[in-house]
Image (tube, rainbow, N blue to C red):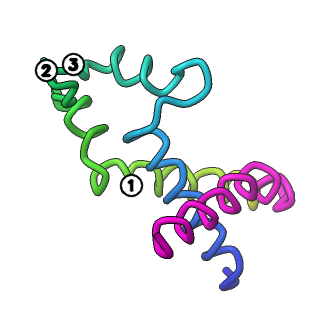
Amino acid sequence: MTIELILLALLATYRLTLMLNSEAGPADIFERLRTRLGVTYDQYSNPQGTNWISEGVLCFYCLSVWMGFAVTLVILLAWLAGRMEIALFVLLPFAISGGAVFLKKWTG
């Protein structure tokens, strides 16, 4: 595994985790997903988990482990198929976005 692939996987995992953990997304898709998984909101719009899945989605560190497994699975399946360009095609947009978001947060 090359350093470029590891960096790509790292940034894609970061971005996917951030989207599922705290963003609404287009047409509130991630907000709706969190609600279906059991996330509720108090009177101050603070999210609260009602089960272990929703608590895991609200924990950035927990969710990043699961997203890391998903990204690794994409890479593994592409490698087994002998088509690593598929993994790059799927993960590269998230990695680029993750890098942009990271730089935005880092620079303020």
Residue 106 percent location from the top left of the image: 47, 74
Specify whether residue 8 is painted magenta: no
Residue 13 percent location from the top left of the image: 52, 57
- Please state which amino acid type lies under the numbered disc 3: Thr
Q: Tag 3's secondary structure?
A: strand
Q: Which residues are magenta?
A: 80-108
Numbered disc total: 3
Q: From the image, tell me which residue sits under label 2.
A: 42
Q: Are marks 3 and 2 in contact (CB under 8 Å)?
A: yes
Residue 52 percent location from the top left of the image: 17, 31
Residue 107 percent location from the top left of the image: 50, 75
Quadrant in the picture for the N terminus:
bottom right
Label annotation for residue 40: 3
- Please state which amino acid type lies under the numbered disc 1: Ser
Choose between 107 and 13: the one closer to the eye. 107
Mark whose residue sits in front, 1 or 3: 3
Label annotation for residue 74: none
Q: Are marks 1 and 2 in contact (CB under 8 Å)?
A: no
Q: Is residue 17 left or right of residue 11?
A: left
- Please state which amino acid type lies under the numbered disc 2: Asp
Label annotation for residue 64: 1
